Image (cartoon, grey):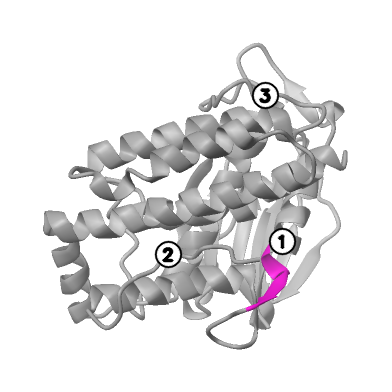
Amino acid sequence: MKKSYYLFNPGRMSRKDNTLKFVPVDENGTEGQPKYIPVEGVSDLFCFGALDANSALYNFLGKQQIAVHFFDYYEHYTGSFLPKEYLLAGKMQIEQTKQYLTKKKRLVIAQKFIEGAAFNILKNLKYYQSRGKELSAYIDTIESFSSNLFQTQEIDELMGIEGNIRQVYYDAFDVILNDFAMNGRSKQPPKNEVNALVSFGNMMCYSLCLGQIYHTQLNPTISYLHEPGYRRFSLALDLAEIFKPILVDRVIFRVLNKKEIQAKDFDINTNSVMLKDAARKTFVRAFEERLNETIKHRSLGRSVSYKHLVKLECYKLTKHILNIEEYKPFKAWW
């Protein structure tokens, strides 16, 4: 079974037969112990730090349908190498564009994304409410905002409701977390430890959604909630809204409340806060464990991983766009 690999300070990458060879190189140019990964078991590579590779290697990765996602020293997502879009189909492109250009149809899909996101946000809050955290005021407020989702007539109006829901939800982090406070959302750069984790986790979720979209006929640049823009895969931003509460936020609550990541695991500067290398590895490990957890799917009648749920969401959206079946956003049922 193929899986994602997370590479910290990957150094030089080369090919040796059907194996990828990584030689880490530190800031002094000293080479570390090589690492070998059989290419048959790789779906994606996530590279944190500089990677030195030539075009022949990328040609090889492209033929093997392996995507590479890049993050810089400051934990910012900087881009992806995606193999040739072998699944894209003309009919799908046309229909996906039509849904975007038709205001009413676009709004319906965008509303569904926020409906799913709000439901999963409330699921988190109700879970922690059941564990003794007093969150009823936050739950009531978000439920009130959510009740207006399908009365919206414009994308901007819908985004305003989504922003209000997120603001209240992030305020609730200060209740859920035992030893840390979020003190409101801050990014580019994050101003405290919780915001640093949220930014890092959201980028991981975005990259995950992009990778799953790539394995369908959907075009990742044509989106419905977020405005399509230059040099970004905005459909991945749309889908990430649904999955951030259950994939990113639940991992943040776990690693902080269980003290797997502590205050000493952050670099705190005057204008920003960053995770240290060890903390990034801890979070990535917890995130990957979450992706590999399985649940019994009610419709399929079998157990599927959280990672596979993202791909299933892409298939559901495809069916909606092709007028096969109405799209219903993923909502956690457990």
For disc 1, the marked residue is 290
The three-letter code of the residue at mark 2 reads Pro
Residue with the mark numbered 2: 329
Split into 4 quadrants, where in the image is the C terminus?
bottom right
- Out of 103 and 122, give the one closest to the viewer: 122
Q: Is residue 239 magenta?
A: no
Is residue 16 depicted above or below 119 in this figure? below
Marks 3 and 2 sit apart, C-alpha to C-alpha, by 34 Å
Going from the N terminus, do you reach mark 2 or mark 1 first? 1
CB-based contact (under 8 Å), mark 3 and mark 2: no
Give the number of the disc on residue 133.
none
Image point (80%, 38%), residue name:
256
> Does residue 294 belong to the magenta stretch?
yes
Q: Nearer the viewer, mark 1 or mark 3?
A: 1
Disc with the residue nearer the chain's start (3 vs 2): 3
Q: Residue most toward the top?
A: 270
Task: Describe the element under mark 3 as helix, strand or loop.
Answer: strand
| Residue 67 position in % (x across, y down) | 52, 66
- How dense is the environment of label 1, judged by Cα within 10 Å: few (below 14), some, or many (20 and up)? some
Residue 150 vs residue 240, the one in the foreground: 150
Question: Are discs 1 and 3 less than 8 Å apart at CB?
Answer: no
Amino acid at pointer 3: Val
- Which amino acid type is marked by label 1? Arg
- Label 3 vs label 2, nearer the camera: 2
SS type, badge 1? helix
Q: Position of residue 207 (x, y in %)?
A: 52, 56
Q: How far, Cα to Cα, is label 1 from label 3?
A: 25 Å
User: In the rendered structure, which segment of residues is drawn in magenta?
Assistant: 291-296
Residue depicted at x 60% and y 69%:
307
Can residue 75 be seen in the rendering of this structure? no
Residue, disc 3: 273
First in sequence, mark 1 or 3: give its number: 3
